[in-house]
Image (cartoon, grey):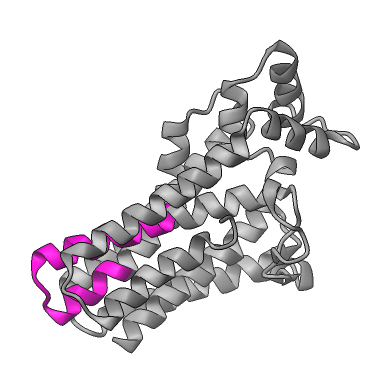
Amino acid sequence: HVKLAATVEFIHTATLLHDDVVDESAQRRGRPTANLLWDNKSSVLVGDYLFARAFQLMVEPGNLRALTILSNAAAVIAEGEVLQLTAAQNIATTEDTYFKVIRGKTAALFSAATQVGPVIAGAEESQVQALFDYGDALGICFQIVDDFLDYGGAGDGLGKNLGDDFREGKLTLPVIRAIAAADTTERAFWERTIGKGQQVEGDLDHAMSILARHGALDSTRQAALDWAARAKSALQALPAHPLRDLLADLADFVVKRVN
């Protein structure tokens, strides 16, 4: 349904506008962010407008279950963002908390988008669940890839600045795994740079060397590949079809940048 697809896009764009304000980001998809081009007030208000329009659109098909799926996703996304704020600069953050954050702030919209289609189409419940599982795994994979690229990307081709997560004190999977393996000196480094936000020239390079030393980027890459495999595995519950193959190809595309 075109209007439900538009609903997903409106929710997504609204969250990006708000996220760039929260993160004080200057670049999105290789271009200046709205809050940089205009200001925070404009970004927040336009994001609010898109959320409002999304809710107007999602009720038009008259499908209560579709409305429930999409409205719940909007709430879960906000919860994920709040959880990320509470975890920021806390070097005791666990992988369990990390996965709760990304399942909320990123995967929730993926799974809502892939679930609402079969619901509207009247598909069997097993297929609805399979596509939910696919979207959930794909969303987690996507966020792990994004977090990997903040340290292991090529920079210019990312559409964002290398090391943004480090500068913002975000506890992403590579850092969480490096902290878990850290010695006393390394832990003091993470406490200063991430925990206290006291960063100086050369800290990002040193952080990347620590990640490499403990294989944190390699294990993060493998985690992304594992979640892509889980997404593709979920599709096996669906009948063979070219569209199923396209969804599997999408999972491969998401991890292409780290593989």
Residue 123, given in percent of the width and then of the height, sits at: 12, 75
The extreme bottom residue here reads: 2
Determine if residue 75 is in view.
no
Q: Is residue 149 left or right of residue 135?
A: right
Q: Residue at x 28, y 82 (%)?
A: 242
The quarter of the displayed image where residue 41 is located: bottom right
Residue 24, given in percent of the width and then of the height, sits at: 72, 54
Residue 86, given in percent of the width and then of the height, sits at: 54, 35
Q: Quadrant of the N terminus?
A: bottom left
The extreme left residue here reads: 124
Q: Is residue 254 left or right of residue 44?
A: left
Determine if residue 13 is in view.
yes
Please identify the dominant SS of the magenta region.
helix
Q: Quadrant of the C terminus?
A: bottom right
On whether residue 171 falls in the magenta region, the answer is no
Which residues are the magenta region?
114-140
Q: Is residue 78 left or right of residue 209?
A: left
**61 or 99: which is nearer to us?**
99
Q: Residue at x 46, y 32 (%)?
A: 95
On whether residue 133 falls in the magenta region, the answer is yes
Relative to residue 111, is residue 221 depicted above or below? above
The quarter of the displayed image where residue 60 is located: bottom left
> How many marks are shown on the rendered structure?
0
Relative to residue 160, is residue 101 depicted above or below? above
Q: Residue at x 62, y 28 (%)?
A: 178
The extreme top residue here reads: 184
**232 or 49: which is nearer to us?**
232
Q: Residue at x 52, y 28 (%)?
A: 93
